[in-house]
Each structure stands twice: as structure tokens, then as C-alpha cells.
Image (spheres, grey):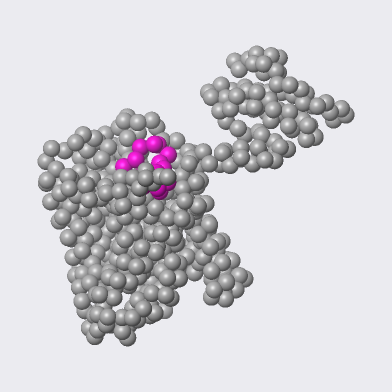
Amino acid sequence: MLSTARLGRRVRGWLVRETSTGRYFPEIDGLRFVAVLLVILYHVNGYLVVKCRDRFDAGFEQSWLYRFVLHGDMGVQLFFVISGLVLGIPFAASARGHGSGVSIGQYFKRRITRLEPPYIIALVVSLGLLIGVRGESFSTLWPHLLASIGYVHGIAYHKYSVISTVAWSLEIEVQFYVLMPLLGLVYFIHHARSRRLMMCAGLFIAAYFEQSRIDVLCIAANGAYVRPFGGLFIYNQLHYFLVGLLLADLWTNEWRHPERRQRAWDVAAVIGWLCIAIAAVAQVPHHIVLPPAIFMAYAGCLRGSWAKWLVTRPPVFIIGGMCYTIYLYHFIVIGLLGRVVVRVGSSGLYAVDLVLYAVSMFTGIVVICSVLFLLFERPFMNRHWPSDTLAWLRRRVEWIPRLSAVGTPKEAHLERAEAWSAWGGKRPEVHVTVGRQSVEARIESSEEQREPPSPTPPPGSGMIPDPDR
């Protein structure tokens, strides 16, 4: 039997995020935990206010707690900053010569193979629930499904996706992924102060235009100005991504070594998080206040002592590592669990009910999404999953021609070419890549007579020409 400690280590191994580089920073997943927690509180509060408004004490909408969770959607902006930080680090390191160069092809391939499959699965699950539970028509939903899969629903319909409420932010994320190779050129400015001043200038200009609603692309409709694409476009959130790029620059160049005065960073973390809370409760220009506040909060958690300790506790960074699955499914889980939770008796006090409902729903979300994470997200964290899946299929379906394997022995490539020969048709030329060698395996075509596959010749025989030929 497994001991409790051993079982805990095994569960932790299952649930901890797998990175493509093999380097893991728990503090970043700890920051993701804070972001996804705020988003969950925002949606739990919205559900309860719609379903249980008549149960709460009068005047609850004036309480500081209600005003705070009402702006819990700022967790999305926290995610945007993290995306800028995570994607900016390899570009900044490459520009300063601290790492290998960034392959743009591999960059986009990784974005697609890592993020697209869980997203499509979540959309299909949501579509099934809309049809099966709410009785929606597939003929009405399928155009929205296609637009959501292509990350263009906000552009096409100027509103949130009817398939998934949270898809709008992922569409903005994808727009940032596309722009990142271009934005990453800023790291090639050699002078550090000039580089960072340029990022800060772009940050505050973008924040000013968004906060003041001055947008040269605005169009008039019925005499009133409206924001194109419903405000669901990258330029509405660009300043948050730029905060992440600035953090990535400092992380790569200035924060490579431990900081002696960590207490000062702890103070910065406290000030930053307090400013974020004040921005939620008070009537302040969010897009002006939030970027510097998030910068201070994140910098303190990345460089401080006890602030970093708080965000690197195992429950915190493990749940934060599952944030993508939690973000995709939490709205669905809230709707399903809410039908049960709202039937429980109410205390009549908004603050008490919100805490009780939020804790119960958050627990259910973590449990359910942990299973969904293991099924629908973690398998795609392995960057080799496409080739592994193809190899798995080939082992079970012998006739599938194996023409695209990489890094396998020469004998395996010859077997794949012979599989084509045995299957029929002209035997093609197979271009094989083994490690860093390029090898061509040619098998003569024969339409009239098909011979059974011959045993694999040893390396160096006439079927494998000299790679340097």
C-alpha cells in the first residue's frame, strides 16, 4: 500500500505542469492561481446575484466586498501580463545571447499543438451541453463554433462567443501570439535604458488610448461612437502584455542572480496588490492604475522573500498550473454545481453566503477540472505528442505508411518504405532524417511484380547511400 506521503508525491507529479524546456518556475504558476481565483470569484458572484438576489441583505451592492468581486474580471488582465512575461523570456534571452535562438516555426507549432486541442475539446463539450441541456439548435450554433475555433468570433460578431463565454480573452491571447515575434524585436535594442523607456512609452500610450476611449478606428452607429469588434481586440489590452514584456526583460538581464534586499521587493508586492484591490473597489481609471500596480505586485512575488514563498506553496502552484483547464471549464461547472448550491439555505447575509458558496464551488471546480486536466490538457503538454500519437497508431494499424518519423533508427525507416511497397502503388522516395544526418532510402518501383519485404539490410548496405552523396 502507498503511504500518504508517497501518494501525495505521485498526485503532485500527475498534476504539476510539464514545460517544453524542462525548466519549471512555480512562482509563475502561483501568479496564475491568483488570476484564475479572481475570475472564478467574479463568475460565482454573478451567478449568485442573478439566482439569489432576493435572499441577500438590503444594500449589499454598496459593500466593499461586492465592489471588489464585481471587478474580479481583472484576473484576465493578470493573465495577459503573465503571457507577456512567459513568451517574452525566450525572445529576450535570445536577443542578449543567453540562450539559443527562437525558431519562429517551432514557436507557432508549439502554440498550436499545446493550446488548440484542449480548447477545441472544451468548445465541443460546451456545444454538447448547449444542445443537450438548453435545447439550442446546432444549425444556429455551428457558425459560432467555427468562428470560436478560428479565434475570430469577436471580430466576426462583435460580441462574446455564444459557445464559450471565456473564449474572448483567448482570442486576444492568440492575436498577441501572432504579434509576439514582431514585438520581440524591441529586445534587440542594445541600450537597456532606451529599450525599457520604449516599452514604458508604448505601455502608457496604449493605456491612455484605452482608458480615454480615444480610438481612431471607432465608427459611428446611430449617432453614437462604438468600439469596433466590441472592444475584443488586442489594442484594447496591449498595455498589459507590454507590462509582461518589460518584466521578461528585467527577469532575463537584471534578475538572473538572487537579490540581497528581498524585503524591499516584499514591500513592493504588498503595495502592488493593495493598489490592485483599491482599483477594484474605488472609482479609479483602471487602465491607468492597473499596469504599474500589476508590475509592482509581480516583481515583488518574483524577487521577494516571503511574497515568493506564498505563491510557491504546492497547492497554490499546482492549481495555478491547471489554470488553462480551470479557465476553460469553470463557467460550465459553476452552472452545473450552482443548481445544487443555490438550493441550500441562505444566511441572509451577502458576505457569508458568498464565502460559503465560493468555497464550495471552488472546491468542486478544482476536483472536476483536475480530472479534465489529466484527460484533456496534460497529454498535450508533451511537445512530442503528435509523433508519439502517430507512432502509437502505426503500432496498431500495420499498413499505415511511416513516412514522417524523425530520430529513429535507419532500419525503421526502411521498414516504412517497405510498408509502402507491400501496400501497393509506386514505391516512393523516402527522405529520412536520422538525428542530424539526411539519408535517402530509394526502393525501385515495380507495378508488375510485388515481392515480399526483404529483411532489413545492415547499415552501410547498398540500400542506404552515403549521406554525403
Which image quarter: residue 440? Answer: top right
Asked if the magenta segment contains residue 15, the reply would be yes
Give the residue displayed 36% in from the left and 63% down from the top. Answer: 363
Tell me the quarter of the image containing the N terminus.
Answer: top left
Give the residue displayed 80% in from the left and 35% down from the top. Answer: 424
Which image quarter: residue 139? Answer: bottom right
Give the residue displayed 45% in from the left and 67% down from the top. Answer: 332
Give the residue displayed 24% in from the left and 80% down from the top. Answer: 349
User: Residue 183, percent across and down?
Assistant: 36, 45
| Looking at the image, residue 332 lies above or below residue 77 | below
What is the span of residues highlighted in magenta in the rendered image? 8-25
Residue farthest along the right direction in this orientation: 448
Image side of residue 48 versus residue 407, left or right: left
Tell me the quarter of the image containing the C terminus.
Answer: top right
Residue 290 can be seen in this image: yes
User: Residue 302, percent across and down?
Assistant: 23, 45
